[in-house]
Image (cartoon, rainbow, N blue to C red):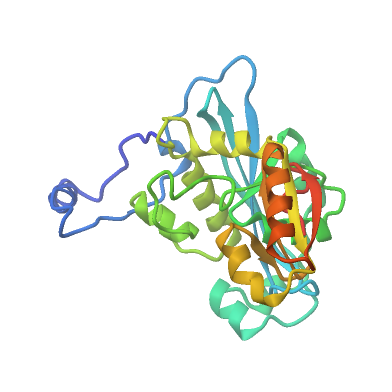
Amino acid sequence: MKLYDQPCASAAMRLHVQALEARAEDYRVLHRLPHADEIWLSPTPSTGAVTLGVIDCETTGLTDTDRMVELALAKIVIGDGQVVDIKPPISMLEDPCMPLSEDVRRVTGLNDEDLWGHSFDENLLATELGDVDVLVAFNSAFDTRFVRQRFPHIRHPWICALWDFDWAGAGYQSRNQTGLLAERGHFYTAHRAAADAWALLVLIANPAPDGRAIAAHLVERGQQIDVRVSAAGAPFHVKDDLKAAGYRWQPDRRVWRIDVAEADATAQVDFLRALHPLIRPVVQEVDWYNRHCR
């Protein structure tokens, strides 16, 4: 991500920052997230641009009976692997008709009075989604569940910033959004939908090691067709073997599963059958419409 020079409080402050950054072995300087007008945009290609809708939602909790109380949508347009346009987030609130827990109030800063009488503007949301090709959240397994529950008519494909990009392979050590942005030299106040959506947009606007925007890699990965292999009936004592082989536990379905390329599916089935006779391998094709759905 290329930035225009960000305004500094004063020339003296700029000198202090430069002095600290020159001593990287002793200090790390974190900057606020850039504003939209501080991000350099590439020329828009004549064809092939993809618009990503960057989603974040805040909820009353983590269970299937909880409700979404805040939704934000930002947009980033990718063309020829580069950022060609961005749109800051819109956000909206909705009254869940139930008191917020103390934990939710503490984490988000929202209270019952903030939400009272509010409803999501479905017409505005439909308009904003009109030019969106694919939705992205940091942990899409969480956001897709609440978005599709509240807006069943939204049928966009989804990609996941957490799982659809090889952060470790790109040299990152963190696995959460705040930490990843800190590695890029930024900080922000998390756990409000608009702030989190903008933070994710900034994160995926950054370049991958090959020079293309991370968002371009997310789209490329999302469009791939995979095979999901589930280890139905796996006994408890083989969980470490499954975890070591890259399988992830899905608590809602109570099954270990892995997504692999179609060419690798047979090897996974053979692995499961050899691991334990009680395991019944289940094979399912997945794409960006169902990859991150429960």
Residue 266 x %, y %: 73, 44
Q: Is residue 276 left or right of residue 204?
A: right
Residue ranking furthest to the bottom: 102
Residue 241 horizontal/vertical position (percent): 60, 66
**Which residue sits at x=30%, y=37%?**
5
Quarter of the figure that contains the N terminus: top left
State which quadrant residue 294 falls in. bottom right
Q: Nearer the viewer, residue 166 or 281?
A: 281
Camera-side residue: 96 or 20?
20
Is residue 79 among what the camera can see?
yes
**Which residue occupies 64% across, 16% down?**
47
Q: Residue at x 65, y 76 (%)?
A: 237
How far from the left and from the top, in percent, is residue 73? 65, 49
Vertical side of 246 occupied by 65: above or below = below
Image vertical order of residue 247 relative to residue 265, above or below: below
Residue at image point 54% right, 22% down: 80
Tally of numbered tags: 0
Which sits in the foreground, 32 or 214? 214
| Vertical comparison of 8 with 98: above or below | above
Q: Quadrant of residue 279?
A: bottom right
Residue 77 percent location from the top left of the image = 59, 32
